Image (cartoon, rainbow, N blue to C red):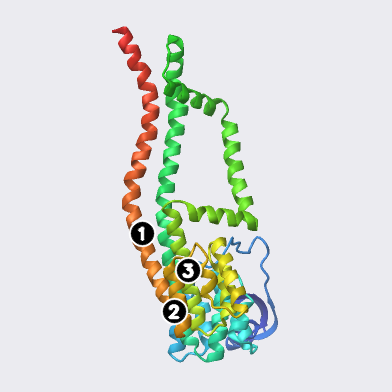
Amino acid sequence: MAQFAYHVKSSSGRQLKGKISAMDKATAVEELRKRGLIVMSLQEERNTILQMDLYIGNPVKMQHFIIYCRQFATLIRAGVTILDATGILAQQTESKPLKKALTEVHSSLLKGNAFSTAAAEHKRIFPSMFTNMIRAGEESGDIEGTLERLAVFFEKAHTTREKIKSALTYPMVVGFLAIAAVVYLLKSVVPQFVDMFESMDAELPAITKMVMALSDSLSEQWYIWLFGLLALVAGFFILKRTSHGAYMIDYFLLKIPIFGKLSQKGVIAQMARTLSSLYASAVPMLQSLTIVEEIVDNKVISKYIRQSADSLRQGNPLSDPLKKAWVFPPLVTQMIAIGEETGSLDLMLAKVADFYEMDVENTVDRLKSLIEPLLLVFLAGVVGVIVASIMLPMFSMYEQMS
C-alpha cells in the first residue's frame, strides 16, 4: 500500500489535512470522495532512508512466497481475474516486500500491462523462473496450472534445502561448542597447573608440553589467533565473490566425504525439479537451461549445464555432455536420454527430482543418527587429551612422593 497526504474540503466547507493508505492515487481519490470530501490536493509520500525497510539478499521468505503461489492459483481456479487476485493478495500477505511489489504490480495491471511484464520489474521479489513460467502460462492460457507447478516447485525446493541445512547445522553447533570448551580449558584451567609444574622442575610428558604451549599462546598471543580467524573468514568470502574462487569452493564441497554426496544430491534434485517445471510450462529449452544455470547452488554443476546448452545449440542431445560430467550419476543421464527419446522429458526429470529428494531425506535421517555419537566421541577425545595432559604429570609426582 502507498501512503498519500491529502488536503480536502468537507461538505460544510471545512478544510482538512491527513493521510490515507491506498493501492494507487486513483483509489485514494475514490475513497475520499466516498467519504463526501472534495479533494484539493493529493501527494504520494516518499519514504526517507530512515523510514525504508532494508533487506539483505532475497527480501521475501520462501514460506510467504509459497503461500502466495498457492493462494494465487486458488483464486484463479475460482474464476477471479488476475487483476482482482493481485489486489486481494497484496492486502492479505504478511510479507511487507511482497505486499509492496504486488501493489505496484496491481497498478501496472491497471495500465494494461501483462502480469509477467509487471512482475519482471521486481527481480528481487519474483525470480526469473517465476516470470518466465508465468509468461509461458499467459501465452498458453494455463495460468492456473503454471501457478500450481510453481507452488510445488518452491515447496519441494524449500523442503530439500531445509533438510540439508538441518544435517549441516548440528555438527557445526557441536563443533563450535567443542572449540569453546577447549578454549575455556586452555585459558582458565590449564594455566592454574602450569606454575605448579614449572616450580617442581620435573620432566613433563610431550602431551603436557604441547597443551601448555598452546595455552600460553592463547593467553599471550590471543590477538594473533583472532586476526588469523578473521583473515580466514574474510579470505573465504573474498574468494567466494570471484568466479574462479566460487568454483573452487563448490568443487571442494562436492569432494567432502559424506556431506559432499549430500550436497550433490540436493543440487541435482534442484536442477531436475527446475528444468521439469520450466519444460512442462512450455518455456523454450535453451531459455530453461539459462535459468537453471543461474539458480542452481553449485558453480561446478552450473558449468556442465552451460556446456549442455552449448551442445544443444549445435543440434546435439541434452544428455550427451552430461554423460561426460562426473557430477551426474548414470541414473540422471539415462533418465534424461529416455525422456528425450520418448518426448516425456518433463516426466523423467520430475522422477529424477522425486528420487533424489527422497534420497536426501533418507540420507539426512541416517546422518543424524550417525553424527551424534561420532561428535560426542570427538568432543570427549579432545577434552580427554587436555585432562590427560594435566593428570599424567600429577600421577608421576604422586609416584615419586610415594
- Side of 195 relative to 317 (left or right): left
Residue 141 at x, y = what percent? 52, 92
Mark number displayed over residue 270: 3
Residue 278 at x, y = what percent? 52, 79
Pointer 1 or 2: first along the chain = 2
Q: Where is the N terminus found, in terms of image quarters?
A: bottom right
- Label 2: few (<14), some or many (≥20) within 10 Å? some
Is residue 69 shown to the viewer in this render? no
Q: Where is the C terminus found, in terms of image quarters?
A: top left
User: As shown in the figure, which amino acid type bears the numbered disc 2?
Assistant: Ile
Q: Residue at x 53, y 91 (%)?
A: 140
Q: How far apart in space, not on screen, are marks 2 and 3 (Cα)?
A: 20 Å
Pointer 2 or 3: first along the chain = 3
- Label 1: few (<14), some or many (≥20) within 10 Å? some
Q: Nearer the viewer, mark 2 or mark 3?
A: 2
User: As shown in the figure, which amino acid type bears the numbered disc 3?
Assistant: Gln
Q: Nearer the viewer, residue 384 or 349?
A: 349
- Label 3: few (<14), some or many (≥20) within 10 Å? many
Residue 60, compared with residue 29, is above or below; it is: above
Judging by the rendered image, the residue that carries numbered circle 2 is: 338
- Side of 365 relative to 330 (left or right): left
User: As shown in the figure, which amino acid type bears the numbered disc 1?
Assistant: Thr
- Side of 348 relative to 52 (left or right): left
Q: Nearer the viewer, mark 1 or mark 2?
A: 2
Pointer 3 or 1: first along the chain = 3
Secondary-structure class at tag 1: helix
Judging by the rendered image, the residue that carries numbered circle 1 is: 363
Q: Residue at x 35, y 16 (%)?
A: 394
* Quadrant in the rendering for residue 177: top left
Q: Residue at x 53, y 63 (%)?
A: 297
Residue 208 at x, y = what percent? 43, 22
Secondary-structure class at tag 2: helix
